[in-house]
Image (tube, rainbow, N blue to C red):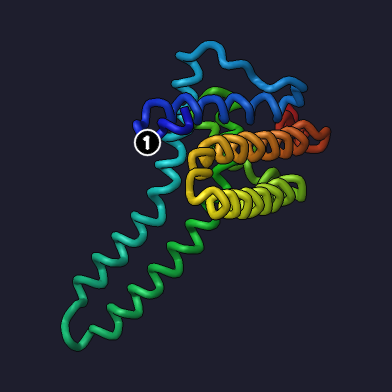
Amino acid sequence: MTFFSIFLIPAFFVAGYMVRTMNAASRNEEEPPEFTDWGTMFMDGVKGAVVAVVYGLIPFVIMFVVGFAAGLTGSNDATGLASGLGVLTVLVSGVLGLAINYLLPAAITNLARTGTIGAAFDFDTLGPVLKSKEYITAVLLTFFVAIAIGVVVGVLAVFTLGFGLILLPFFYFWLYLAGSYMFGAAFGRVVETPHHSTEQSATPMD
């Protein structure tokens, strides 16, 4: 399915399995999820894709708004201002892009745990996770694993005259699976701590 994700529909099943893996890891389940209940798995993938699109639109909306504003001031006298706004827009969008890539796995894990898209935007729950050393460690580990896989694939492609690239989807599936496990496990360790549970259940006294 990863190999045929270019046709889009299989990609939703792969994404749904990753969402399911995040949920299982966050609940400290020892066995990986099974490939069952395909309809639900497909819908989980669709929900994850919707969340990713919504978050991904933020930098593009900012670029469009600032670019439109720069266009309104696009006279000869304002060329410098427009250029400055353009550079600032690219920089801000780049920073936002990195921030969103950092936030997105936690958001999708919360979606996986609850089954609702709104949970991906529940920053009361996401905040402590994003600031935790467990989550930061998961991000760094996933980053280094991705680099390692890239090196392995590159070497394999060179020594097999490019034929080794046919294994690329399998490498990336493993990377997504490992990342989903690390993010889910980190999320679960943070939200299941007594301190966080107490904060979530606290209510005003009568």
Q: Quadrant of residue 33?
A: top right
Q: Give whichever of 21, 133 is nearer the camera.
A: 21
Number of numbered markers: 1
Q: Is residue 74 above or below residue 49?
A: below
Q: Pinpoint residue 139: horizontal percent, then vertical percent.
A: 66, 49
Asked whether residue 46 appears in the rendered view, the answer is no
Asked whether residue 123 appears in the rendered view, the answer is yes
Q: Give whichever of 169, 33 is nearer the camera.
A: 169
The reply, left or right, for residue 149 in relation to residue 47 is right
Q: Pinpoint residue 155: horizontal percent, then vertical percent.
A: 60, 54
The reply, left or right, for residue 9 in relation to residue 75 is right
Q: Pinpoint residue 134: horizontal percent, then vertical percent.
A: 76, 45
Residue type for callout 1: Ile
Q: Is residue 205 above or below residue 102?
A: above
Q: Quadrant of residue 75?
A: bottom left
Q: Helix, strand or loop at disc 1?
A: helix
- Identified at 21% across, 76% down, the residue is 73
The reply, left or right, for residue 47 in relation to residue 35 is left
The reply, left or right, for residue 143 in relation to residue 52 is right
Write down the residue under mark 1. 6
The residue positioned farthest toward the bottom in the image shown: 77
- Identified at 19% across, 77% down, the residue is 74
Q: Is residue 145 above or below residue 174?
A: below
Q: Which quarter shows the C terminus?
A: top right
Crowd class of label 1 (few under 14; some 14 to 19; many from 20; radius 10 Å): few
